[in-house]
Amino acid sequence: VAPPPLSPAKTGAAGGWVTLDAADPRLQAVNENQEFTPDLLDYMKNKWDIVSRGFDYNVVAVFGSQSTGKSTLLNRLFGTNFDVMDEVSRQQTTKGIWVSKAKDADLLVLDVEGTDGRERGEDQDFERKSALFSIAIAEVLLVNMWENQVGLYNGANMGLLKTVFEVNLQLFQQKGSPKTCLFFVIRDFTGVTPIENLSGSLMKDLERIWAGLIKPPGKEGSLISDFFEFNFAGLPHKVYALQAFNAEAQKLKSRFYDKQDPAYTFKPTFHKHIPADGFPQFAEAIWEKIVTNRDLDLPTQQQLLAQYRCDEIMRVAYEAFAVEIKPYRNQLESGKVLETLGKETQQHFMTALEAFDQDGSRYNKEVYQKKRGEFKDKMSQALHVYYVQQLRNLHKRSLQIFNERLSEKMRGDDSDFALKLRESRQEAESYYTRVSEASKLLEADWDGDEYFYQFQAEIDDIATQKRTEAMNRVVKNLDRYISQNLIEPVEVLLNDGPTDVWKKIFATFTQTLEKAETQLAKQLAGFDSSADEIATSVREMKYQAWDLMQKTIKDEFADVKVLERLRHRFETRFRYDESGVPRVWSAGDDIDGPFTRARDDADQLSILYAKMDVPQSDLDRSILDDDRFDPSSFVVLSPVRLQSIRDKFKREADLLFVEAKRSIVVNQVG
Ligand code: GDP
Ligand code: MG
């Protein structure tokens, strides 16, 4: 089947590039100016759909003198549409390397065009470069030659083959490098000399060329078969033996298409192991090296390609990863705690890593492993930022849980504070620990201990503060209890003024204190307080009670109040009789007697009040052996104040006496 007729490519104006129809499946890989196309990746992706084939693709190139029917052969075998020299005008084709995809096969076909330097006396530079390029990237090199060129050891082809061998030695020095298949196609094959004889004769020539090569150090004893495998086929004259040509071409085609064919050409050992997605980059790098005449060795090129491609694959995979994980960042920044953060980010991490592995694993193992490590680190670093943010949110949330639980449990009840605290704390901490563990990336060994310690330290602070507050409340409640049990009873006792008033006041004080102390000890037990701590609180409470006591007494002993008590005592004695009935004085009543008794009685009270008189035995019961606590040093009424109050009282009593006398006069007159 002939290739579809397409018009020949025309030389365009655009910088040495040939203009093609948009529908044309070919690509000019290298142009007349020896520039490499920027479009190869695009073609492999969009026109040929071969970029995602991994290693499942092949590359074939052609090699041979000008106008030996190379393009015709390629078009026939692979259904391509490379330019064929016009049969009528014998027009020269342009220089360059063309590439196309074989019909119905994942096979890249390279056609080399060029003026025949030997015939036209030009330099062989381009031939050498294109041979070098072909052999670096193709698995199979079709060596196209006329039957009558076979055996011409000094012929043009042999010169070129010498070039091929030299180039090959330079490229594939490494042990285990792929072999290249040299596939000789003998054109205008008559059959007069069987193909076996022709190939034997060719092999002899090749061995001679090989023997004559200067080999690199260490490769002196290497054999041609260490680097190449050879195939041979004869193809009859295309015009004079058209039928035979067609039949043989069909057979030849099967050797490139049919994997079941025993003579199938593409052995895995020929593959250059460039993943399809890296092929454009690789081909370009090889060409640049060739053009700039720099040393070219494939291992280095493969290494460079691996680095370039793995970086690229990583970049693409990371971009996708970044898009996936972005929403978490927004949520975390808004302060949320994401309880399934670890699990979910782990999934994105694995997906991205798989994407990287899929393409990256085909490249140089060392480079791939190194880049894989870098990629994992990069993702892990990005996720670590999330992890830290999560821990910050978790810190806040867990403190909140702690505070909520504690206040729920307390509800104005300070008993069993330590237990409530412990339970709230445990709940908050186990929440923290569970979520922080679940926020980690599985393979990253992130250490969140420091954050946890910070969290614990803050709970400690809050706990201490809450405890102090609660303890203060307890003490305050006791203060209230003490003042209720102290102030009023003291006032009543002072009003009554029994002779043992101080003993009684002090007994009240001591009793209240004892009760308060028992209560305090009981309540503080719920705080897990130490004996020391309890002792300190008790002492503090006692001092406060003592202060309250002193203050109460001071208040009760304001001048007015004392005077009032004296007056009251006097009046009860003087103006009322023994049975509490108000006295009405009559003439001849003894006023002086009751007056003096009542006045002395009241005066006695003032003396009683002057000093806090507590028996030593009672003092001992009060437990406080401290300078701050010494009733004997407490001055209730100074002598001066006492005297002035007594004077005042006496004057008032005298007035009442006079009044009583007058009342008799009034009664008699009435
Ligand atoms: P290329 O320069 O090596 O690519 O050769 P072309 O494919 O352009 O063909 C050069 C000329 O040889 C054209 O005129 C073809 O028609 C002619 N040609 C192609 N195949 C054969 C063949 O098998 N035998 C002969 N004698 N001529 C052929
Ligand atoms: Mg051609």
Image (tube, rainbow, N blue to C red):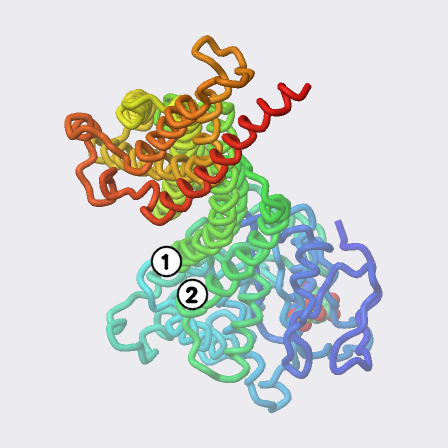
Query: Of the residues shown, which amino acid type is indicated by label 1?
Result: Glu
| Viewer-closest of 299 and 57 | 299
| Viewer-closest of 424 and 17 | 424
**How many labels were placed on the picture?**
2
The residue located at (51%, 65%) in the rendering is 308
Which part of the image, by quadrant, shows the C terminus? top right
Does residue 471 appear left or right of residue 111 in this picture?
Answer: left
Residue 504, horizontal then vertical, whole percent: 30, 22
Q: Which residue is mark 1?
A: 366
Measured in 3D between alpha carbons, the distance from the residue under mark 2 to the one under mark 1, in whole angstroms, is 9 Å
Residue 519, horizontal then vertical, whole percent: 33, 21
- In contact (CB < 8 Å): disc 2 and disc 1: yes
| Placement of 360 over or under 302, stated as above or below | above
Q: Few, some or many C-alpha atoms within 10 Å of disc 2 (few <14, some 14-19, many ≥20)?
A: some
Residue 102, horizontal then vertical, whole percent: 66, 53
Q: Disc 1 beta carbon < 8 A from ligand 2?
A: no
